[in-house]
Amino acid sequence: MQLSWSREIRALAEQPRYTIHMKRTNLMLDEQLLESVMRELGAKTYSAAVNHSLAELLRVRKIQRLPTLYGKVLWEGDLAEMREDNPRKPKSGTAARKRSPASVR
């Protein structure tokens, strides 16, 4: 019996461990605002509501920064040429539509 326990313990010790980095803190939050956010998001815990709200704030801020990238060289290539290299396959059972070059963007 002792031998099987030691094998199980050794097997558990050899398993990879994953660390989740969390921060525990106390916050002073507007109770009505927090309850509204929880209802809107369908969050079951205060932590879930706050974490989701923080992630959403960062997502929106990144989107708001997109205009600063306009006009900068991010990608070089010929889109028309790329489309010719990998043409779309027509869906089975439907005729392939041909577009005039003016309608292709």
Image: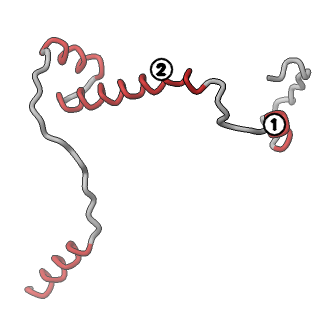
Q: Quadrant of residue 29?
A: top left
Decide: few, some or many residues near mark 1? Use Cα within 10 Å; few <14, some 14-19, many ≥20. few
The circle drawn on residue 78 is 1
For the residues labelled 2 and 1, the Cα–Cα distance comes to: 27 Å
Give coordinates of residue 20: x percent, y percent.
25, 51
Query: What residue did someone put label 2 on?
Result: 64
- Apparent side of residue 97 relative to residue 6 in the rendered image (left or right): right
Q: Work out which quarter of the rendered image holds the N terminus and state it.
A: bottom left
Decide: few, some or many residues near mark 2? Use Cα within 10 Å; few <14, some 14-19, many ≥20. few
Q: Which residue is painted at 29% across and 25% down in the image? A: 53
Q: Which residue is painted at 26% across and 32% down in the image? A: 51
Vertical placement of 1 versus 76: above or below? Answer: below
**Amino acid type for the residue under numbered disc 2:** Gln
Q: Residue furthest bottom?
A: 3
Helix, strand, or loop for circle 1? loop
Helix, strand, or loop for circle 2? helix
- Apparent side of residue 19 relative to residue 87 in the rendered image (left or right): left
Q: Work out which quarter of the rendered image holds the C terminus and state it.
A: top right
Vertical placement of 59 versus 85: above or below? Answer: above
**Amino acid type for the residue under numbered disc 1:** Asp
- Apparent side of residue 62 relative to residue 93 in the rendered image (left or right): left
Give coordinates of residue 26: x percent, y percent.
9, 31
Q: Quadrant of residue 71?
A: top right
Total tally of numbered discs in the picture: 2
Q: Earlier in the sequence, mark 2 or mark 1?
A: 2
Give coordinates of residue 2: x percent, y percent.
8, 86
Q: Quadrant of residue 74?
A: top right
Vertical placement of 52 versus 86: above or below? Answer: above
Q: Which residue is painted at 81% across and 36% down in the image? A: 78
